[in-house]
Image (tube, rainbow, N blue to C red):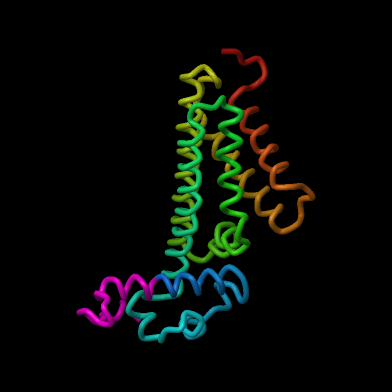
């Protein structure tokens, strides 16, 4: 399949072509979250199975996507967008709090969003890995956005005198690996702790990076 089929145009059932297209796309993504994020997973799903789960035809699938990989790419971005929106909302709400409290609010928002639905965490940390060079580039690009966010917040904290003045990029990259690994293992039942305990541990790690031994404002 070299490209998407051309979708019908014009109004039908009181909805414009754009509205019908957005609705179909949403149904495919909802079905993909269930199949990719649970059973049988991305690698075990076919176009026919996804279309059936969405209650749509394979022709309608190819009007919206070129391949299942395109669906996986779109769903991975959507899951990350949900988490990013939760974090940015928390940032706004916590902007006047001291650093430790602010970090707790932010990481709790992220952790609750990602782990609240096991399918989302599987999409974020499992199904997307190793699929293709294109999706690996997308995964790393989205991770870079999280790294940039941490660096930006750390720099702002340093300006306020709440953290050390330094280049945080390497530390933030390492920290993101800790966040992802710990949340994945916790959601899989390999870490005997509550989500609050997991968040508290992440906050302690971040504060240790931002306020190393011997630091003072």
Q: Residue furthest left?
A: 10
| Magenta span dominant secondary structure | loop
Q: Quadrant of the N terminus?
A: bottom left
Position of 177 relative to 68 (above/below)? above
Q: Residue 185: where, in percent of width, then height? A: 70, 53
Q: Residue furthest right?
A: 192
Q: Residue 37: where, in percent of width, then height? A: 58, 68
Q: Residue at x 31, y 75 (%)?
A: 20
Position of 33 relative to 79 (above/below)? below
Residue 60 occupies quadrant: bottom left
Q: Nearer the viewer, residue 141 or 159?
A: 159
Q: Nearer the viewer, residue 74 or 118?
A: 118
Give the extent of the magenta segment. 1-25
Q: Residue at x 67, y 32 (%)?
A: 204
Q: Residue 168: where, in percent of width, then height? A: 52, 30
Q: Residue at x 48, y 30 (%)?
A: 95
Is-magenta flag for residue 147?
no
Left or right, 193 with reference to 159: right
Q: Residue 7: where, in percent of width, then height? A: 27, 80
Residue 14 occupies quadrant: bottom left
Residue 5 occupies quadrant: bottom left
Q: Residue furthest front?
A: 14
Q: Quadrant of the C terminus?
A: top right
Q: Residue furthest top?
A: 217
Q: Residue at x 51, y 33 (%)?
A: 94
Q: Nearer the viewer, residue 18 or 136?
A: 18
């Amino acid at each position: 399949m070299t490209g998407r089929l051309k979708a019908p145009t014009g109004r039908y059932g009181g909805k414009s072509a754009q509205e019908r297209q957005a609705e179909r796309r949403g149904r495919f993504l909802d079905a993909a979250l269930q199949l990719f994020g649970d059973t049988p997973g991305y690698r075990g799903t076919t176009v026919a199975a996804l279309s059936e789960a969405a209650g749509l035809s394979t022709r309608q699938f190819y009007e919206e996507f070129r391949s299942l990989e395109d669906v996986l790419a779109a769903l991975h971005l959507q899951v990350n967008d949900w988490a990013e929106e939760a974090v940015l909302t928390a940032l706004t709400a916590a902007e006047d709090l001291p650093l430790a409290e602010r970090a707790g609010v932010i990481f709790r928002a992220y952790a609750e969003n990602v782990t609240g639905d096991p399918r989302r965490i599987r999409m974020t940390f499992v199904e997307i890995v190793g699929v293709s060079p294109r999706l690996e580039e997308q995964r790393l690009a989205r991770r870079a956005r999280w790294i940039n966010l941490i660096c930006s917040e750390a720099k702002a904290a340093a300006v306020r005198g709440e953290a050390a003045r330094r280049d945080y990029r390497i530390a933030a990259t390492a920290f993101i690996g800790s966040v992802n690994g710990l949340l994945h293992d916790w959601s899989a039942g390999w870490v005997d702790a509550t989500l609050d305990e997991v968040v508290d541990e992440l906050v302690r790690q971040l504060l240790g990076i931002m306020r190393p031994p011997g630091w003072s404002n």
